[in-house]
DNA sequence: GCGAATTAGTATGTATTCTAAACTATATGT
DNA sequence: ACATATAGTTTAGAATACATACTAATTCGC
């Protein structure tokens, strides 16, 4: 390491300008609004530490953006002049889209957090050219946009989640092994999902989006720091730390699938050995359970696994148990390395629930007692990634409301 | 997870005030100065994007703090009026202190990054009461402060590094197993290390401080994202991501020592099983090499290990190799989970250099080919933590120069 | 019912701090 | 010497938050 002060890094910070203060305070006021409660200017002033005068001025600008609206007068029975309620407008939302191995999905989430439109198409995307998939996705998005417009929802932005490594800045899918995609640029295709939306459309990883959906729209205990495990065809992961997604310096943090859990284990498709995916991936579990690919669909094979488990088939049960143990080792690594104590299981891990949860919990207690104290199963089902992608777009809008002015 | 917008979190952000702009820009100007080069107001204006007028005004304030000083006129042979050089003042510095198992150390680093004073006392701290240790540390610090004052260095702040889990906010050592410390409050003791210093004295973890020292004062290739492995009595770790320390939500990230690398491994003192420390800790290596504690000092036993290795003792070599393999599994977990590709080895790992580096590298290549591409050995020796603790204090001062005004 | 008390929200004047543009200062080149 | 170029300062103007005083709308006590 040469001397690096951390102060001469190339990413020179922009100078602070007087207008930055207002940009920040506009966003700050929005953080005091919740989807389900109304707040008055006076309450916001107290909560933020701004003066009433400043809040009035900021709220006037925010009303002009259409993000919030007045909701008549709040009568609370107390003495004094009642305040005017402020709340997120129900007439603005964002579009979320997902391309996955077995399906396409598009939805619209409004500022109050409700999934107002959602459509899903089953599709065997493993063997189709990307262009075909994207064309079908665009058709689906157009229908969803139409439905949203009919409900009076204007789109602020959008997001597309894919099961692979992405570069949001360039709109490129670096690699999505289970779709057989590599280095595919979606720049124009992204914009077309929500044409004219002021906050644009951003590409994201499916596990990351699902992890955020759990934070924003999930139903479990309130935890703001956890590892989300997405059991799709591969094993994906998303790290949420202090209520925000942790992506690492290169943007690819949380890749649980290829953490090594058994140095003497099987070779993995990644070139490594003993990766989580070789024990807890969909194929690995099915193979270990004796359900080799007989040309049947993934859904059918998963159903067969469920049946075997229900029958008490020893091979199936042991396959799932070994998957749980493999996950435990990776989860402990995450707990130690990034300091977290909660895990959320999604995808087929959520479907397998206790069958995988019990051995996972037992292994956690054996290998690192007391370290991981909360295990939760996602209840968002297959809408998680769509909701997360849309939610991220909404949050982009809320984080820079000044962009919507003028 | 209940609905959590991430916007209603209790840690409500402070409102932006007009004065914040200046605070930010004061710090911004300082980021354009490097320890070894001088810059002019005009150059700073171009680099930051601020106007010359603003930079002049900001620099005037910074000169008043004493952090920087004018260095005469820069004559570059070009046409036009030459600029006035600006550089960090050599007359200000910060104190770094370290309590470790076998020694105490205190030093002073100036704003140009030079370790101007350094003293070290060997001490068997494992069996002494904390009060005795701290009393000796304070005596040492007083001598070092005197030496710094004699060289004309004023102290801006300080830092104390200890080998354990700390809470910087409360000045508490939660636990330092190898010192047999638990829940020890150092609040007053900290302030006494650098009395009157405007930026105070902050408690930190030894591995974290050493990791930062490598970033700021290290000699290897320029990398701004890496895992630092500190081989002291225990195995510590520090994560540097994008030129800053990653501490996680709870502040205890990077705890490599208790990552599980062998689910069928030995019980660990932490209650878990197969932890890195059971294979790569100092005791574990010495025991596996057949050098059981015969009452001799740690230094003597480490010397014996070096001798055995030099002789080609198979047991010693295999002990170190197994340690390397254990580290590899943990390093891969870090690489996948937090997205990094570089590792720096410090402490006794640096002393063992290639002996541990070769098996580590081989295991990395076998288990996750191509993922971890840089392996570096620290050259800061035992001054790393002291330099890091002092450097952190200097950076606190540089990050909020407005505190030094008035 | 009516005034006092209480709270919500707005208007006005001031301080801070940025930018833009004009100005002064000091060098090199011919 | 004088043109040219660059460094740094001065001055005027704009944005924005704060403090304070003001207006608006409600409940409480009688």
Image (cartoon, coloured by chain):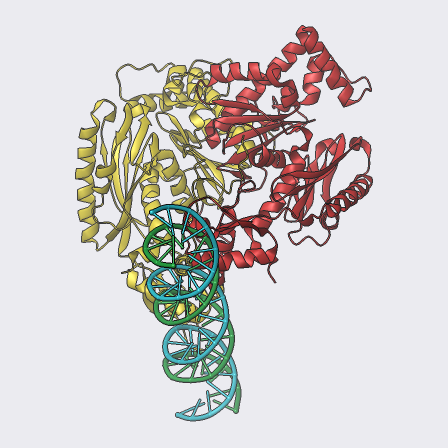
Chain colours: A yellow, B red, C cyan, D green
Q: Is residue B326 above or below residue A150?
A: above
Q: Is residue A39 above or below residue B147?
A: below
Residue B6 visible in this rendered orientation of the protein: no
Q: Quadrant of residue A302?
A: top left
Q: Which residue is painted at 71% across and 16% down in the image? A: B287
- The residue drawn where x is 49% and y is 54% is B24
Residue A336 image offset from top left, x and y in percent:
56, 32
Is residue A15 visible in the rendered image? The answer is yes
Task: Give percent across and percent down for residue B5.
Answer: 42, 50
Question: Looking at the image, is B32 positioned above or below residue B379?
Answer: below
Total labels: the figure holds 0
B347 sits left or right of A258 in the view: right
Q: Foreground residue, A302 or B20?
A: B20
Quadrant the C terminus of chain B occupies: bottom right
> In the image, is A170 to the left or to the right of A21?
left
Q: Residue at x 57, y 29 (%)?
A: B219
Residue B341, x across and y down, in percent = 47, 26
Picture coordinates of residue A147, whole percent (x, y): 19, 48
């Amino acid at each position: 390491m040469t001397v690096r002060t951390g102060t001469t890094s190339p990413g020179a910070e922009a100078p602070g300008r007087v207008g930055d203060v207002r940009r920040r305070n506009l966003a700050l006021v929005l953080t005091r609004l919740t989807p389900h409660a109304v707040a008055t200017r006076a309450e916001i002033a107290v909560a933020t530490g701004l003066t009433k005068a400043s809040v009035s001025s900021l709220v006037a600008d925010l009303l002009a953006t259409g993000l919030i609206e007045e909701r008549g007068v709040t009568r609370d029975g107390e003495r004094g002049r009642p305040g005017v309620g402020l709340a997120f407008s129900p007439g603005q939302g964002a579009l979320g889209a997902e391309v996955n191995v077995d399906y396409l999905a598009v939805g619209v989430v409004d500022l109050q957090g409700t999934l107002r439109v959602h459509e899903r198409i089953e599709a065997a995307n493993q063997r189709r050219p990307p262009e075909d998939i994207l064309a079908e996705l665009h058709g689906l998005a157009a229908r969803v946009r139409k439905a949203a417009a009919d409900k009076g929802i204007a789109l602020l932005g959008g997001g597309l989640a894919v099961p692979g490594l992405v570069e949001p800045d360039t709109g490129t899918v670096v690699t999505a092994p289970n779709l057989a995609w590599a280095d595919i640029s979606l720049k124009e295709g992204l914009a077309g999902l929500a044409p004219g939306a002021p906050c644009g459309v951003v590409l994201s990883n499916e596990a990351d989006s699902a992890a955020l959906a759990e934070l924003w729209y999930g139903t479990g205990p309130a935890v703001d720091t956890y590892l989300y495990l997405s059991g799709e065809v591969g094993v994906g992961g998303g790290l949420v730390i202090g209520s925000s997604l942790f992506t690492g310096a290169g943007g690819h943090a949380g890749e649980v699938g290829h953490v090594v859990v058994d140095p003497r284990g099987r070779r993995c498709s990644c070139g490594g050995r003993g990766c989580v995916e070789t024990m807890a991936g969909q194929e690995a579990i099915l193979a270990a359970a004796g359900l080799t690919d007989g040309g049947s669909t993934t859904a059918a094979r998963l159903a067969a696994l469920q049946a075997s488990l229900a029958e008490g088939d020893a091979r199936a049960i042991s396959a799932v148990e070994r998957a749980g143990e493999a996950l435990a080792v990776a989860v402990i690594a995450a707990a130690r390395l990034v300091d977290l104590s909660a895990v959320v299981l999604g995808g087929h891990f959520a479907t397998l629930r206790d069958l995988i949860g019990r051995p996972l919990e037992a292994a956690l207690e054996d290998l690192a007692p007391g370290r991981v104290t909360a295990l939760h199963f996602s209840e968002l089902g297959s809408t998680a990634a769509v909701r997360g992608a849309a939610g991220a777009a909404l949050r982009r809008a809320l984080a820079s409301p000044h962009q919507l002015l003028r």
